Image (cartoon, helix red, strand yellow):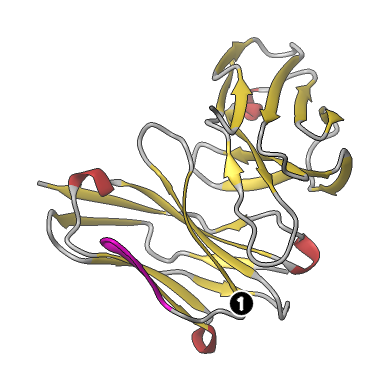
Amino acid sequence: AQKVTQAQTEISVVEKEDVTLDCVYETRDTTYYLFWYKQPPSGELVFLIRRNSFDEQNEISGRYSWNFQKSTSSFNFTITASQVVDSAVYFCALSGGNSGYALNFGKGTSLLVTP
Amino acid sequence: DTAVSQTPKYLVTQMGNDKSIKCEQNLGHDTMYWYKQDSKKFLKIMFSYNNKELIINETVPNRFSPKSPDKAHLNLHINSLELGDSAVYFCASSQDGTGAPRVVFGQGTRLTVV
């Protein structure tokens, strides 16, 4: 069975601080997919990134960066120079194998960025 | 153009009633899903349909029944609503193929059972 653990339930930072959201996953599948979604206070789920298990390249998109390490089964997300608008719940998710493309979500990390 | 749209956005109803939530996607995706987000924000897959056929049916009470009239629509019918059904329900869709699929979510339907 697939499992995603986001050990950080809540994080609070001051604007302009860097923050890393941890994601650890478990799967027996050799092919799988990892995702991050953002859920702002307005409630919608905003896609941030997807990565397949064969692509361990790290990615940077503006202030966002992702570190995928198969050796530690982790897919961590870093926000550089955080802003108040980054305040949201962030979900890491896993799919693939017998689950098909259905996402197995972690419990989410609530990030609060204060001015 | 809204990619995945759900109606209604808010639904307040009494226990015992039957209600439906509609979902439509205009992305040409093959697979559609229903997810439930509980009061603790935990998101869990309920159903997955591929080309109108059910491929995942998690442990959901049989009061919940998905119906897919065509590839672009996946509606959720709920019979005999209970207080514990109060949650946000998200519809989503994705396209099969190689590589990591992009799963697109609707805006959610907040169901409150009183």
> Which residue is under mark 1?
A53
Q: Where is residue A1 drawn, in percent x and y?
A: 73, 69
Q: Is residue A41 left or right of residue B32?
A: left
The quarter holding residue B113 reads top right
Chain label for disc 1: A
A21 relative position to B45: left or right: left
Query: Does residue A78 appear to the left or right of A49 in the view shown?
Result: left
Residue extending furthest toward the bottom? A71
Q: Nearer the viewer, residue B86 or A51?
A: A51
In percent of width and height, residue B91 lies at: 65, 35
Residue B49 image position (x, y, % from top left): 81, 43
Q: Secondary structure at mark 1?
A: loop
Horizontal relation, residue A87 to residue A49: left or right: left
**Quadrant of res B61:** top right
Who's the residue at 58% across and 46% down the image? Answer: B43
Q: Is residue A60 magenta?
A: yes
Q: Amino acid at mark 1?
A: Ser
Instruction: Specify start and end residues of the magenta stretch as a single range.
Output: A58-65
| Residue at 61% from the left image edge and 81% from the top image edge | A54
Is the stretch drawn in magenta largely helix, strand or loop?
Answer: strand
Counting every numbered tag in the picture gives 1
Residue A88 on image: x %, y %: 34, 46
Instruction: Name the residue nearer the viewer: A67 or B41.
Output: A67
Q: Residues within 10 Å of mark 1 (few under 14, many from 20)?
A: some
Nearer-the-camera pick, B3 or A109: B3
Judge whether residue B75 is colored magenta: no
Quick one: B92 or B26, which is closer to the camera?
Answer: B26
Residue farthest toward the left in the current orientation of the protein: A115
